[in-house]
Image: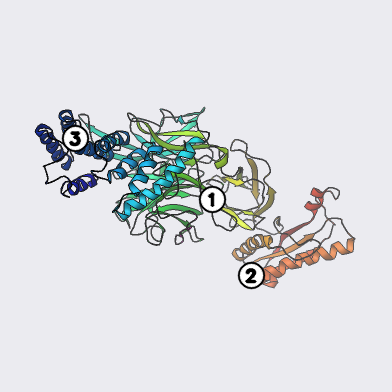
Amino acid sequence: MKRKAFVWLLLFLSSGLNGVYGQNLHTSSNRALKLYNEGKENYNNLEYSNAEKFFREALKNDARFFEAYMMLGEIYSDEGKYTEAASNYRSAVNIDSNAYRPVYFSLAKAEMMSGDYQNSLVHYKTYLRNKGNSEKNTAIAKRNVINCEFAIEAVKKPVQFNLINAGSGINTTDDEYWPSITADGQTLMFTRQIHSNYFGAMTSSQEDFFTSTLANGVWQKAINAGEPLNTASNEGAQTLSSNGLYMYFTACERPGGYGSCDLYFSAFKNGVWSTPINLKPPVNSQYWETTPSVSADGSTLFFSSNRPGGLGAKDIWISRLKPDGTWSTPKNPGKNINTEGNEMSPFIHFDGKTLYFASDGRPGMGGYDIFMSRMNDDSTWTEPKNLGYPINTYNDEMGLVIDAAGTTGYYSSRRDNLNGKDIFYFSLDESVRPNSVSYLKGKVSDKETGKLLKADYELINLSNNIISIKNSTDESGNFLVCLPSGYNYGLNVKKDGYMFYSENFTFEGKHSVSEPLIKRIALNKAKIGEKILLANVFYEVDSWELRKESLAELDNLADLMLKSKDLIVEIDGYTDATGSDSYNLTLSEKRAFSVVKYLNSIGISQDRLKYKGFGNSSPVGDNVTSEGRQMNRRTEARIIGTRK
C-alpha cells in the first residue's frame, strides 16, 4: 500500500504554512479536529475504512475542512476510486486553491484516471506553472499533458468496438485474464485468480491455468489444467502454441529460479501437461521476466523484462530458437518498440509480423494502452499505432491476443466490480488488423505401407529464401501451419531412412482453418531405384546457373547422402520442348552438372554422384500451356546404387 499521502501530509502540516502540527488547520471546530486526528491514526495503520468514516464525520462538523478532503482524496486514490478522489481534491481546491499547490498534480491524475481528460489537462497545466515542483512529478505532468491532448482527440474519433463477454463457461466471480488461443480458434487458455474467503473477508488468492474449448459457438466450462502445471505457487501470463501442444508461461519465486519471476515451458502429452522446465539463461536472468509470446512456428520468443540494457523500466526483448534447441541471447528491438516507460504483454500474431503490446511510454489514454507494430522486411519495426478509443481507456489495457483470422481480439477487463476481471472479445477495427494468413494441413505416411510417420518439415518463402517454418509433425504425421497469403513457398518433408519430399506452391486467396490447403505426403524408403523430384531447384532463364533459392533444397539432398553414406545418386535434368532437341539436351546436362558441382562443394564426394541430361525426352506435362512446360522443366535425384 502506498504511503505517499501520509508522507506529504506530514510535510505539509510541518511546513509552517498552517502553523504547528495539530493547530491552525482549516477548521475552528475542536470536534472536527479530534475526528480528523483519529482518521489520521487509522490511515497510518492502513485501516482505510475506519479512516474514511472519521474524515467524513469531521466534515459533517466542518464542511470547509481542507485537510479532511485532502485525506479522503488520498484514501480513494490508493484504493483506485479515482472519481471519488477527484471530487474530494476538487473540494479542497475550492476551499483554498493556494494552501498546497501540489494538490493540482493529485487532482489532475485522479481526473485522468477517471476519464475526465478536459479537466485533467487544465489542472496538469496549472501544476506546471507552480515553482519548486519535484523533477519526477514535473516529467510525469508533461507526459500526461500529451496523453490528455491525445485522449481528447481519440474520444472524438472512436474506433469500431463491440465488446462481448466470453460467457459463463470462462468467466466467474473470480478474476479471469491473460487469454491465449490456438490457431484453429477452438481452445482458449487463461489465468484465473481464485479468491479464498473467510466469513466474507478475502484471506488469500491462487493463480492457476484453465482451458476451455469451443462447441457450437459457445465456450464450454473451463477445466483446471491440473498438476504438475498448476502448483501451490502462482502461475500466469502464458502463451499457447499455435497447435495447443505446448506453452510458455511466467512463474515467480519457484525453487531453482534465477530471478524473482522466470519463464517456463510445458508440453501437452497424453492428456496432461508436462512438468514445467525453466528456460534458464540467457532468457531468464537474475531480474524479472514475464508475459511471453511465441511465434506460430515456435522459433521466436517475445517477452518483457527489467534486465539491464533496455530503454526503460520494463522493455520487450526477443530471443530466437537455435538449431540445437536452446534460445539465443535476447535482443532489444530498440526505440521503435521500447520507450523510457514500460512495455508489457507482447503478442506476436500468427502471421509472424504483427506485434501487439502494452505501453505507458507513448501518447495514450492513460496508464497502459495497447499498440500495434509490423515487422519490415529488414526486421525493423514500424512506428507503433495506438489501437484507439474505446479499446484503450483510462484503465490499464494489456494482454490482448488476436485470433488467427485476424478479425477478433480477446482481452480481460473489469466491467463489473461484482464479477472482477472477465475475458471479452470484440471485432478488431480493420486499420489495426494483422496480415491475412492461410492454412496448410499435412499428413505424412510411408508410401508402401501407409503407416503414419513423424517427420520433420520446413516451408521456405521462395521470394526471400527465408525459412518461414521449421518443425516436426505430431506422432500421427499431422501438421497445421498458418502462412501469409500471396507468396510462393517451398515445402520439404524428411525423415531418416526415407527420400525427402519436395514441392512448391503459391498461397492464393485464403484457406481457412476449416478449409485448409491439404497435402497428403507419402515418403519412399531410401533404396535403389527410388527418385526425388527436386521441385525447389531453380535456374536462371535459359541458363544452367543455380538460383540462390535452390540451395536449401540441395542442402537437404546433401544431408540425406551424408546420413546414408553408401548411396550413389544420379542427378537427372529435363527441359520443355522450347528450342531444338540438341540445345535442350545440352542445357539439361549442364543443369544437372551444376547440381553435382554444388554438392561437391559442400562435401559430397565425386564418386557418389553421376549426372545425365534428357532434354525433352520424358515430358510429364503438356508443352502447350505454361503450367505444362513448367512441369517438364525439372531436376530429379535418383538412387542408382551403393558403394561396396
Q: Callout 2: 10 Å neighbours few (<14), some, many (20+)?
A: few
From where the camera sits, is residue 269 visible? no
Give the SS element for disc 1: loop
Residue marked by disc 1 = 297
Which of the two marks, 3 or 1, is nearer to us in this view? 3
Circle 2: residue type = Ile
Q: Main secondary structure of the magenta part?
A: loop
| Direction from residue 127 to residue 637 in the image, left or right | right
Circle 3: residue type = Phe
Q: Earlier in the sequence, mark 2 or mark 1?
A: 1
Give the SS element for disc 3: loop
Circle 1: residue type = Asp
Q: Residue at x 60, y 47 (%)?
A: 483
| Direction from residue 392 to residue 479 in the image, left or right | right
Q: How many marks?
A: 3
Residue marked by disc 2 = 602
In percent of width and height, residue 587 lies at 82, 64
